[in-house]
Every structure is written in structure tokens, then in C-alpha cells.
Image (tube, grey):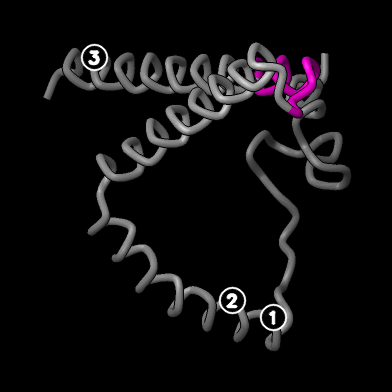
Amino acid sequence: MNVTNGINPYATPGMVKPGMMPGALDKQTIPPAELKALNAALEAGESSVAKAGESGFHNIYSELIAGVADKQKQADQAVEGVLKGENTSLHQAMIAMEEASLSFKLMVEVRNKLLESYQELMRMQV
């Protein structure tokens, strides 16, 4: 059995070659122009990373919750439009309701994963 058989489905073509040790990659050089562009992007990205750190995780999750609430409001308005006989089609209302439902399910799953991660960190021995 070849050791790389388990890796190949996840590797990009040419990344892992038969006979290579797992984790060993081809040594490739980066052209100097591309390296300079990457360094410039990294320097510019440091300020955005700092801003993201300042904004905090709470703000990111709050935006997610606000987005879900907006989707729910849009779905409610679409259903009201259908019930009042306004210019809202049943299809649009159903699509809005499904979008709201999927957004809510995504938010719940993100919360569950975050909670699992937190609990795993608390179980770690220091």
C-alpha cells in the first residue's frame, strides 16, 4: 500500500508524488516580482488584521445575528405582501422564507461549533 494514497484525494495535482514522504512538498521558488507583491500585501494586511482584532469577535457575530434578523424581516414582509394581495408573488415569499430559515440554521451551527471549540479548550490540560 502506498502511503500517499490517503493524501492524494486532498492534494492538488502535482503536489504529492508517489514515493514522497507525507508532508514533503516540491520545492518551488517564488518569482521576485510576486514575492514583492506578496510582501506589500502582507504589510497592508497587517493593519487590516489589527483592525479586525480591534473590532473583535463579538462584532462579527453580532453582524451575523443582524443579518439573520434582516432576512427574517424580509420574509415576514413578503408573507404579509402575499396575504394582503400586494404585488408579491408566492414564489418570492417562499424563497425569502427559505433564505431566512437557512440563515438561521447556519447561525445556529456556527454557534454550536464555537461552543464545542470553547468546551474543548476548557478541557485541555495546561
Residue sitting at the far front:
85
Coordinates of residue 105 in the picture (x, y in percent): 52, 14
Q: Which contiguous range is marked in magenta?
A: 87-98
* Left or right of residue 40, residue 82 in this image: right
The structure residue drawn at horizontal position 35% and vertical position 73%, both measured from the top left corner, is 47
Labelled disc at residue 44: none
Which residue does the numbered mark 2 point to in the structure image?
A: 38
* Left or right of residue 124, residue 113 in this image: right
Give the secondary structure at mark 3: helix
Looking at the picture, tell me which residue is in the foreground, 88 or 122.
88
Tell me if label 2 and label 1 are in contact, CB under 8 Å.
Answer: yes
Which circle's residue, 1 or 3, is located before the other in the chain?
A: 1
Coordinates of residue 106 in the picture (x, y in percent): 52, 20
The structure residue drawn at horizontal position 34% and vertical position 36%, both measured from the top left corner, is 61
Q: Marks 3/2: CA distance? A: 37 Å
Q: Nearer the viewer, mark 1 or mark 3?
A: 3
Coordinates of residue 37 in the picture (x, y in percent): 62, 82
Looking at the picture, tell me which residue is in the foreground, 107 or 74.
74
- The answer to whether residue 92 is magenta is yes
Which residue does the numbered mark 1 point to in the structure image?
A: 34
Mark 3: few/some/many CA within 10 Å (<14, 14-19, 20+): few
Labelled disc at residue 119: 3
- The overriding secondary structure of the stretch rendered in magenta is helix
Q: Marks 1/3: CA distance? A: 41 Å
Q: Please name the amino acid that badge 2 sits on.
A: Leu
